Image: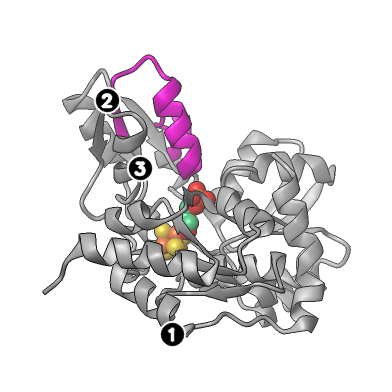
């Protein structure tokens, strides 16, 4: 019989025995967040992966996150509980496509969202997350950049930095792309006092209607610090669990039940227990790819 409390305790015991740290993204289901050592956004978890003293990192998230952890900590064992947990947006720009795009625009810096494969990162000048994309691009000081795979995050950067010409790849997150301006207007009508927090992976015409455009962990800080009591959350529904824990007295409204990332929800307590016990699903990045991707990823974790 499925017993989440027993599984939780078994996982915590095994993690201690195996010298493992469990990192979970804010989109993981509640019981996975609750068993983790650290829960955070892509930037926070990359920093945890770079700094941990544990010998094994169990990454409750999607494949590009575990790969990024391996790039930053090559001598650690990185385990991905569910090997099918990919990111469709990361698959929208391949290394071959990026090579052609870069060759067509020789000398223009390549700025890549962390939601990308290690092979793509290896072709990039610098990586960014949703928490620091604007700060990283500003730090480069270029008047023109190539930005991929997320056209929505790239548009957000372009609007924040009008002095930079941002050439966009045509990728997107299927989960965030579903949100429409009409849904925001409708939610505002029903909850006129609520603050709207939107993720920059949403369409520009959605982002335009938000009170704040934030990474997932930035949403947690915004909600805690805000004098408002009610929030409309325009990102994947897993964040609602983290929000309720961070600000228990406040009300958080999920914009729509379609705000679900099926890949993020593949990881379960059972799959975490399996990889911890058996050491399976180890994430591997070749030395060559790692060597070429490292500077871009280190640039990302050092800014913002
Ligand atoms: P952040 O948690 O870094 O804002 O990222 C959202 C996301 O889509 C990760 O896949
Ligand atoms: Fe990828 Fe979107 Fe899922 Fe994040 S929420 S992992 S960007 S598909």
Q: Residue at x 58, y 48 (%)?
A: 44
Confirm or reject: label 2 Cβ below 8 Å from ligand 1. Answer: no
The region drawn magenta spans 207-232
The one of 25 and 21 positioned closer to us in this rendering: 21
The location of residue 207, given as percent across then percent down, is: 44, 38
**Relative to residue 156, is residue 185 depicted above or below?**
above
Image quadrant holding the N terminus, namely bottom left
Task: Tell me which numbered mark, 3 or 2, is placed earlier along the sequence.
Answer: 3
Q: Nearer the viewer, residue 293 or 52?
A: 52
Could you tell whether 34 is left or right of 55 in the image? left
Q: CA distance from mark 3 to mark 2?
A: 12 Å
Counting from the top left corner in percent of width and height, residue 29 is at 30, 57
Q: Residue at x 23, y 36 (%)?
A: 253
Tell which tag, 1 or 3, sits nearer the viewer.
1
Residue farthest to the left, as pictured: 1
- Based on the picture, tell me whether residue 219 belongs to the magenta stretch: yes
Q: Who comes first in sequence, dot 1 or dot 3?
A: 3
* Residue 198 numbered tag: none
Determine the residue positioned at 55% across, 53% down.
42
The mark found on residue 242 in the picture is 3
Classify mark 1: helix, strand or loop: helix
Q: Secondary structure at mark 2?
A: loop
Per the image, label 3 sits on a secondary structure element best described as helix
Depicted 209 relative to depicted 99: above or below: above
Q: Nearer the viewer, residue 45 or 162?
A: 45
Q: Which quadrant of the view contains residue 241?
A: top left
The residue wearing badge 1 is 278
Q: Which residue is mark 2?
A: 250
């Amino acid at each position: 019989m499925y017993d989440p409390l027993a599984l939780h305790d078994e996982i915590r015991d095994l993690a201690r025995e195996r010298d493992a740290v469990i990192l979970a993204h804010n989109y993981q289901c509640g019981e996975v967040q609750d068993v983790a050592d650290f829960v955070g956004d892509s930037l926070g978890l990359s920093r945890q992966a770079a700094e941990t003293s544990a010998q094994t990192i169990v990454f409750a998230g999607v494949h590009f996150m575990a790969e990024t952890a391996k790039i930053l900590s090559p001598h650690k064992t990185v385990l991905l509980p569910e090997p099918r947990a990919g990111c469709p947006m990361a698959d929208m720009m391949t290394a071959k496509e990026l090579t052609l795009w870069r060759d067509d625009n020789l000398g223009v810096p390549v700025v890549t969202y962390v939601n990308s494969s290690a092979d793509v990162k290896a072709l990039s000048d610098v990586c960014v997350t949703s928490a620091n994309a604007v700060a990283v691009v500003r730090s480069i000081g270029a008047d023109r950049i190539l930005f991929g795979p997320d056209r929505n995050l790239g548009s957000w950067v372009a609007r924040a930095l009008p002095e930079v010409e941002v050439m966009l790849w045509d990728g997107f997150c299927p989960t965030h792309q579903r949100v429409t301006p009409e849904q925001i207007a409708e939610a505002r009508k029903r909850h006129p006092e609520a603050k709207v927090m939107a993720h920059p992976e949403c369409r520009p015409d959605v982002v335009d209607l938000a009170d704040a455009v934030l990474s997932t962990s930035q949403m947690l800080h915004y909600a805690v610090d805000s004098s408002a009591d009610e929030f409309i959350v325009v990102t994947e529904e897993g964040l609602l669990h983290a929000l309720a824990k961070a600000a228990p007295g406040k009300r958080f409204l999920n914009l729509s039940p379609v705000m679900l990332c099926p890949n993020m929800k593949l990881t379960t307590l059972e799959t975490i227990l399996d990889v911890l016990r058996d050491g399976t699903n180890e994430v591997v990045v070749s030395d060559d790819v790692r060597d070429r991707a490292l500077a871009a990823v280190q640039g990302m974790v050092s800014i913002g």
